[in-house]
Image: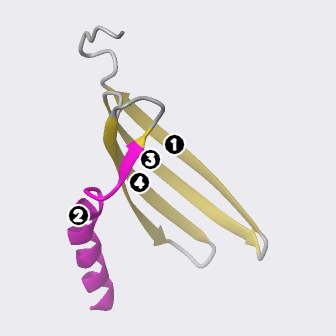
């Protein structure tokens, strides 16, 4: 029951947290940068995860990441990840100054 309660709290609080996170670069454009991830242990030494990310700065960007890792020893963990990125940077013609 505790795991379900923690997941529910995370899902309810994640959208609220994105309202408070502002990212800025060198110009005056301000945007929201939000990310949520899930990780599941498959065995004692092997786990897998999924990450979702949205950035609304300098045009919108969305990414999905899948990954897995294996704990070889107490001090060594090997992993592999794949990220799919979708950017709307060139979708709209914007005249830059």
**Residue at the image position 34 percent from the left and 21 percent from the top:** 89
Q: Between disc 3 and disc 2, whose residue precedes? A: 2
Label 2 sits on residue: 16
Q: Quadrant of the C terminus?
A: top left
Q: x and y percent of residue 30 in the render?
A: 33, 39
Closer to the N terminus: mark 3 or mark 1?
Answer: 3
Q: Could you give the CA–CA distance between mark 3 and mark 2, rounded to whole angstroms?
A: 22 Å
Nearer to the camera, 8 or 68: 8
Name the residue: 29% across, 72% down. 10
SS class of the residue under badge 4?
strand
- Mark 1: few/some/many CA within 10 Å (<14, 14-19, 20+): few
Check disc 1 and report the residue beneath it.
Answer: 82
Q: Earlier in the sequence, mark 4 or mark 1?
A: 4
Q: From which residue to which does the magenta span run?
A: 1-23
Q: Mark 1 or 2 closer to N-term?
A: 2
**What residue did someone put label 3 on?**
65
**Which image quadrant is residue 91 in?**
top left
* C-beta proximity under 8 Å, tags 3 and 2: no
Mark 3 vs 4: CB contact within 8 A: yes
Residue 8 sits inside the magenta stretch = yes
- Is the residue under label 1 in contact with that under label 3 (CB below 8 Å)? yes
Q: Quadrant of the N terminus?
A: bottom left
Q: Which residue is mark 4?
A: 51
Q: Is residue 58 left or right of residue 49?
A: left
Real-space CA distance between mark 3 and mark 1, rounded to the nearest whole angstrom: 6 Å
Place of residue 12 in the rendered image (x, y in percent of width and height, measured from the top left): 20, 70
């Amino acid at each position: 029951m505790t795991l379900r309660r923690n997941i529910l709290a995370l899902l309810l609080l994640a959208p609220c947290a994105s309202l408070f996170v502002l990212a800025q670069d060198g110009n005056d454009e301000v945007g929201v940068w939000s990310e949520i991830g899930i990780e599941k242990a498959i065995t004692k030494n092997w786990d897998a995860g999924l990450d979702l990310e949205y950035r609304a700065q300098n045009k919108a960007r969305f990414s999905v990441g899948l990954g897995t890792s294996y704990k070889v020893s107490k001090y060594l963990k090997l992993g592999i990840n794949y990220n799919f990125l979708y950017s709307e940077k060139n979708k709209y013609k914007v005249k830059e100054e």
